[in-house]
């Protein structure tokens, strides 16, 4: 959970702020950093940290405490969202794809949903009275032109393709993106392919 939608940072950007190459940071500095600044998403593969806490650590200052308690603007992971709704993480993603939840917001590749939206979905679940999802016979809305339409990672993929040296294999670009932003290299290869295809078709 990201408390109250606070600004966050990942380890690649922390290393950059510290003026240390990212591989060196991960090998030499990350273990001590993680002891003092916990990841905000411990149930996720994404290592994201509160920006104010990370900046305090880098400056050698006391680590400020995070806000306590639940807040409507907290950003929840798919696992946290699934727990609140009593469904699986796959169903959370299906809800988002079909409009029962918003697409969410993405922070460094981690897909998150505001707590107030998840509570509203829980209290107005499909078939539970007014506001409970799409009524029978209502259209689902326009279909996506491709699976990743609207995905903010496409902009990252497009930038990576534009700046990569000519002839760089997509697998190498995908591996670097996965290292920086999370998700698997295979996912980033699909995003790169989608980006390249639709850039050429537009």
Image (cartoon, rainbow, N blue to C red):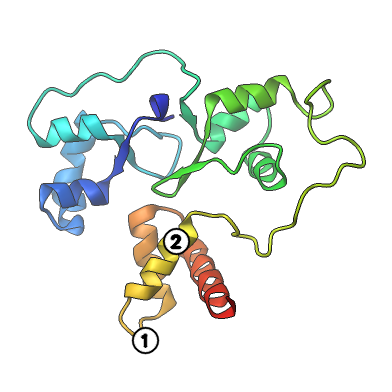
- Is residue 39 positioned above or below 173 on the image? above
> Residue at coordinates 70% horizontally, 42% vertically from top-left?
99
Q: Would you say 171 lies left or right of 82 here?
A: left
Compared to residue 143, the image places residue 50 above or below, namely above
Task: Name above or below for residue 30 compared with residue 190.
Answer: above
Mark 2 burial class by Cα count in 10 Å: few <14, some 14-19, many 20+ = some
Callout 1: SS: loop
Please state which of residues 122 and 90 is positioned toward the viewer in this rendering: 122
Residue found at x 69% / y 45%: 94
Q: In the depicted view, which residue is nearer to us: 47 or 74? A: 74
Image quadrant assignment for residue 177: bottom left
| Figure quadrant of the N terminus | top left
Please tell me how crowded label 1 is: few (under 14), some (14-19), or many (20+) other residues with Cα within 10 Å: few
How far from the left and from the top, in percent, is residue 8? 32, 37
Query: Do callouts 2 and 1 mark residues in contact (Cβ within 8 Å)?
Result: no
The one nearer the camera, 148 or 22, is: 148
Foreground mark, 2 or 1, reads 2
Give the residue pinned by disc 1: 167
- Left or right: 41 in relation to 16: right
Look at the image and tell me whether residue 18 can be seen: yes
Q: How many marks?
A: 2
**Residue 184 visible in rendering:** no
Q: Which mark is residue 155?
A: 2
Residue 110 is marked as: none
Point out residue 202 in the picture as x, y percentages from the top left corner.
58, 75
């Amino acid at each position: 959970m990201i408390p109250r939608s606070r600004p966050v940072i990942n380890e690649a950007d922390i290393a950059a702020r510290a003026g240390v190459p990212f591989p060196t940071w991960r090998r030499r500095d990350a273990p001590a950093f993680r002891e003092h600044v916990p990841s905000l998403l411990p149930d996720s593969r994404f290592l994201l940290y509160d920006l104010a806490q990370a900046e305090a650590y880098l400056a050698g200052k006391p680590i400020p405490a995070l806000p306590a308690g639940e807040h409507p603007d907290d950003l929840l992971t798919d696992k946290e969202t699934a727990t609140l709704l009593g469904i699986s993480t796959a169903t959370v993603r299906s809800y988002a794809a079909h409009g029962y939840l918003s697409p969410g917001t993405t922070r460094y590749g981690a897909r998150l949903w505001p707590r107030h939206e998840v509570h509203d979905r829980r209290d107005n679940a499909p078939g539970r009275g007014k506001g409970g999802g799409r009524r029978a016979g209502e259209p689902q809305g326009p279909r996506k032109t491709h699976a990743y339409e609207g995905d903010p990672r496409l902009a990252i993929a497009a930038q990576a393709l534009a700046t990569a040296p000519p002839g760089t294999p997509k697998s190498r670009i995908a591996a670097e993106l996965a290292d920086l932003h999370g998700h698997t290299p295979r996912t980033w290869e699909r995003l790169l392919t989608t980006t390249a295809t639709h850039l050429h078709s537009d």
